Image: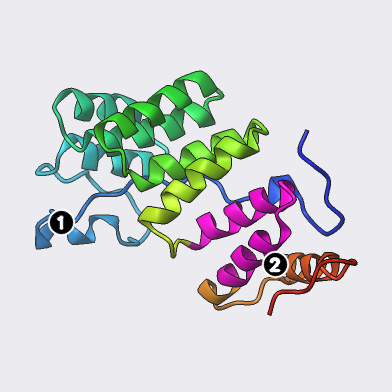
Amino acid sequence: MGKIVPFPLRQSSKFGFERARKRSRENPDQLNLFSPKPAGVRRLPTNISPFEEALLLEERDDSRAEKLYLRAIAEGDQIADAYCNLGILESRAGRMTKAFDCFTRSLRHDPRHFESHYNLGNLYFDGDNLRLARMHYELASEIEPGFPNLVYNLGLVLALLDEKEAALEAFVKYQRLVPREERWTRDLIGGLRKSLTTPGQGTPS
């Protein structure tokens, strides 16, 4: 089990998985595919790639998404992204070994795939392997240092590893990234600052 630390901290409060989206090579006519749409039945566009179609199906909770991601992989269409999103589907189905395999396959195709590093961090976090969770979160932070969910989850891992000053720095950064003030973040920061006032430790400025 993770280390219990003397301030408000719940392992279940971490943010969850992050899907890979369509990258920047789309044409202008396809940009609106992923924006919010009015309610109602809509046909899938016919001029999109297997990965794009899989993403649209997944957003509609359509079980055909898995086959489309596999087709995207077979056809060489955004392979790293397709493996990443397939890993999320495997995880949601409770097939954790397959989820790990998908995320690692994604990283074989793109070692700097942000979402796969982040999602692997989440899997290791859930499995209480905090050091590997930290490693993947930190690798992800080298790619996208300003992603709020990542900063928050890394702060949780650091706190559970009893690296309180680094955890405090992460939570303060998260507060700067997220304009709304969330109570649990304020509680974590307050608890960390209080714990750092013990003899021999000073509170970071």
- Tell me: 166 left or right of 69: right
Q: Quadrant of residue 200?
A: bottom right
Q: Identify the magenta region.
A: 148-174
- Tell me: 49 left or right of 153: left
Q: Where residue 84 sits: x, y (%)?
A: 36, 36
Pick whichever, 89 or 114, lies toward us: 114
In the image, residue 167 lies in the stretch drawn in magenta:
yes
Label 2 to label 1: alpha-carbon separation: 38 Å
Q: Which mark is residue 30?
A: 1
User: Is residue 177 placed above or below 59 in the rendered structure?
Assistant: below
- Amino acid bearing label 2: Thr
Pick whichever, 160 or 85, lies toward us: 160
Residue drawn at point x = 32 percent, y = 32 percent: 106
- Tell me: 156 left or right of 37: right
- Amino acid bearing label 1: Gln
Q: Are marks 2 and 1 in contact (CB under 8 Å)?
A: no
User: Is residue 99 placed above or below 125 in the rendered structure?
Assistant: above
Residue drawn at point x = 31 percent, y = 38 percent: 111
Residue drawn at point x = 37 percent, y = 39 percent: 58
Q: Which mark is residue 185?
A: 2
- Tell me: 189 left or right of 174: right
Q: Quadrant of the C terminus?
A: bottom right
Residue drawn at point x = 66 percent, y = 60 percent: 167
| Closer to the eye: label 2 or 1 | 2
Q: Where residue 44 sits: x, y (%)?
A: 21, 43
Q: Quadrant of the N terminus?
A: top right
User: Is residue 152 placed above or below 11 in the rendered structure?
Assistant: below
